[in-house]
Image (spheres, rainbow, N blue to C red):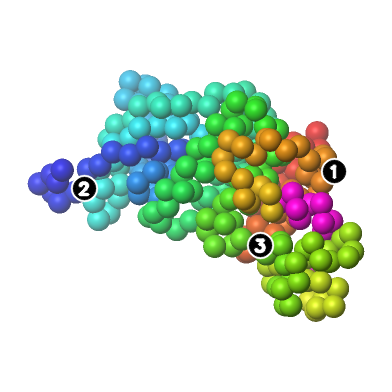
Amino acid sequence: MKPPDDALIYNTRALVIRKTDYGDHDQILTLMTQNRGKLSVMAKNARKSVKRFSGILELFYALDVVIRENSRMAHLQEASLSEPFENIRKDILKTAYASYFSEIVNRFLEEGTRDEGVFDLLFHTFSDLDSGQRTCEETSLFFQLKFLGLTGHKPELSACIACKKTLDHMDHVRVLFDVGEGGIFCRRCNRGTGKTLMLTKGALKQMIWFEETQPGKASVIRFSRKTLLESLAFLERFLPFHLEKELMSLKFLNTIRKE
């Protein structure tokens, strides 16, 4: 539908990943939408009128929204609550992880980048956090690996990026990963660039398994907590390196985990 002022009005599903107060009464929401990618929208009088949006413009909420978009700004016309994921907001650790996932999506994706796969992944991830069927650590591992794959930053974990020797044919228990190069090296091809770390073959195989697993099936195999934490520590170094930005939510998450 196209109104007389040439604005475009459409409806879509959306996840609230950021919100900022604007002026005395308004809010600017950053949404990960199903049909339009990442989108910033103005919610007029969201802080003034209780009736208009009925308190549903909260972080991590899944909404059905109607958006009016013109050349200057997109405005939120209507919104209804689809899924509150209320258990996330009741748990400080789950909130910290959800904030980390949201900041990753917000920082990596350009405005208007259409990627239904990222929306589906983030929705599924919030659902996992909310239900508690998997641990927060398993959910985080799954999200980060899938997100890196969807955005073209997938690390090479199964073979040496120089000679293509497979992980299974490497004799040592620990394997060199070059963060800058984005992959593993066998001992013969080790270049020693300075941005390297050692990963156990168990951690690498765990991450490969998660990469290949479809949503809803990643809890079939249980890995040791030591291996899980090793994998998470690696991803939380690898991902910000390629983003080239410090993630404030990761600092918050680390603080909560220490407590």
Query: What residue lies at 66% left-to-right and 42% top-to-bottom?
Result: 140
Whether residue 28 sits left or right of residue 151 in the image: it is left
Q: Which mark is residue 226?
A: 1
Q: Is residue 252 visible?
A: no
Query: What residue lies at 68% left-to-right and 35% top-to-bottom?
Result: 219
- Report the front residue among 224 and 131: 224
Which element type, helix, strand or loop, lies under badge 3?
Answer: loop
Residue type at numbered disc 3: Pro
Q: Residues within 10 Å of mark 2 (few under 14, many from 20)?
A: some
Whether residue 68 sits left or right of residue 96 in the image: it is left
Which element type, helix, strand or loop, lies under badge 1?
Answer: helix
- Residue linked to disc 3: 155
Which of the image's four quarters has the N terminus? top left
Q: Which mark is residue 8?
A: 2
Q: Position of residue 247 (x, y in %)?
A: 64, 52
Q: Nearer the viewer, mark 3 or mark 2?
A: 3
Query: What residue lies at 81% left-to-right and 71% top-to-bottom?
Result: 186
Q: Earlier along the polypeptide chain: callout 1 or callout 3?
A: 3
Q: Are marks 1 and 2 in contact (CB under 8 Å)?
A: no
Residue at the limit of the structure toward the right, as seen here: 172
Which of the image's four quarters has the C terminus? top right
Q: CA distance from mark 3 to mark 2?
A: 39 Å
- Report the front residue among 55 and 235: 235
| Highlighted magenta segment, given as a residue range | 194-207
Residue at the limit of the structure toward the left, as seen here: 4
Q: Position of residue 23 (x, y in %)?
A: 39, 40
Residue type at numbered disc 2: Leu
